[in-house]
Amino acid sequence: MKILYFSWIKDGIGKSQEDITLNENIKNISDLIDFLITINDDYKKIFSDLSSIKFSKNMNIVDINEKIKNEDEIAFFPPMTGG
């Protein structure tokens, strides 16, 4: 699975993307976040307030319960504003 990070999320984690292989316990974005926060404290800090993070799967905005698989591209980014 390709994971993309944008804006302050990218800055906090220190990378713009990474590839991981999902294990059988990671079935949705919530499970993915639970896995990511075990990597190190940077991930734990970034994902501590999910109200300030949006998610996309294959370039479509989705919610945290969206089912995922290894072939998907997941992105984490701050909420967008318009004007």
Image (cartoon, helix red, strand yellow):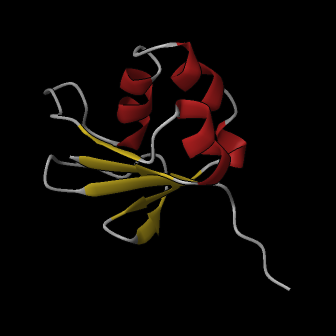
Relative image position of residue 32 (x, y in whole percent): 36, 33
Up/down of 37 relative to 78, above or below = above
Task: Check the picture and name the quadrant holding the C terminus.
Answer: bottom right
Up/down of 37 relative to 33, above or below = above
Relative image position of residue 73 (x, y in whole percent): 28, 57
Q: Nearer the viewer, residue 76 or 17?
A: 17
Relative image position of residue 69 (x, y in whole percent): 17, 48
Q: Nearer the viewer, residue 69 or 16?
A: 16
Q: Nearer the viewer, residue 12 or 54?
A: 12
Relative placement, left or right, of 56 versus 46 is left
Residue visible at 36% across and 23% down in the picture: 35
Residue visible at 44% across and 48% down in the picture: 16
Relative placement, left or right, of 50 versus 16 is right
Q: Residue furthest right?
A: 83
Relative image position of residue 66 (x, y in whole percent): 37, 52
Q: How many marks?
A: 0
Indicate the quadrant where residue 28 lies.
top left
Q: Residue furthest bottom?
A: 83
Residue visible at 63% across and 48% down in the picture: 53
Up/down of 71 relative to 24, above or below = below
Residue visible at 21% across and 24% down in the picture: 25
Relative placement, left or right, of 44 versus 21 is right
